[in-house]
Image: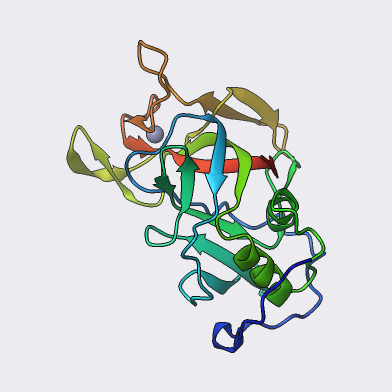
Amino acid sequence: MQTEDIDLQNLGLFDDGEEAVDLGALPAERSSLPNEIPQPGTLVLRIPGNLTADPAIFGQVTDTEGYKRLRIKFTEDMSLLIQPSGTPLSYNVFDFRRTDREGNVRGEMLSFLRALGTSTATSKAEMVKSVLAARGKDFKADLAYEATCNPKRAAWRNGKKDVEPGCGQKYDMKARTYPRQDGTQVVILQVPRDPSGKWLSQFACTGCGADVRAFVRLSNYRAK
Ligand SMILES: [Zn+2]
């Protein structure tokens, strides 16, 4: 593995052997630029050539179980670049395995590093150096939308802030249902499309009319 002799002291990383902990309880934490998010599908993405060991990019987040996790936050300044257009895509990559409500494991960092050809990194510092060593490198990933009508915040409806919060409805690329432990059903709706078939990254919730914004999910990282 190629890594650079870079001083990572300012990142304050430490390695504590927690990588194998299952983090099923962790909430989804993803981000994207508020506008110009691309349509779902396979993308070629480039690691930004100006990436540095910046604490704003590489940092630690504490998960719901108290473990410190490596997070790479591709921001507007140092973002993944969609090829060939060069359009920036902000995105967070984490070093843990995340399990969704249906039990599917969504690994991020290790499959991300594998796509960059540097899958041997096992410590946080090696992971950071591996990503820095992949500056300018392209990889492939599948982009999907997911959205939740936020039940914890006052919703916007028809352009006005409403007193009623969102209804909690979740949206994904495919409508589906699955049972909760108590036997009731969770219903996930499909992200709506416009009449031309274009997926909508912002739409009105079919349940309560609240404005809902889709977030980007990357998966299936692989070499270009
Ligand atoms: Zn709703």
Q: Is residue 48 above or below residue 216?
A: below
Color encoding of the figure: rainbow
Where does the C terminus fall, quadrant-wise?
A: top right
> In the rendered image, which quarter is residue 178 located in?
top right
Indicate left or right for 63 with 209 as reference.
Answer: right
The single residue placed furthest to the top in the displayed view is: 195
Query: Residue at left 81%, top 76%?
Result: 17
196 to 74, vertically: above or below: above
**Quarter of the image holding residue 66?**
bottom right
Q: Residue furthest left?
A: 160
Count of residue discs: 0
Q: Tell me where residue 123 appears, x and y as whole percent.
A: 76, 74
Foreground of the two, 33 or 131: 131
Depth order, front residue of 193/25: 193
Q: Is residue 48 visible?
A: yes
Along the line of sight, the residue nearer the viewer: 208 or 58: 58
* Residue 45 coordinates in the image, percent (x, y): 54, 44
The quadrant of the picture occupied by the N terminus is bottom right
- Quarter location, residue 21: bottom right
The residue that appears at 43% across and 61% down in the rendered structure is: 78
Q: Percent x, y for residue 2?
A: 74, 68
Q: Left or right of 65: which side holds 41?
A: left
At x 73% / y 73%, what residue is drawn?
126
Q: Nearer the viewer, residue 94 or 104?
A: 94
Residue 168 visible to an observer of this rendering: no
Query: Image height check: is 206 above or below 29?
Result: above
Report whether 160 appears left or right of 21: left
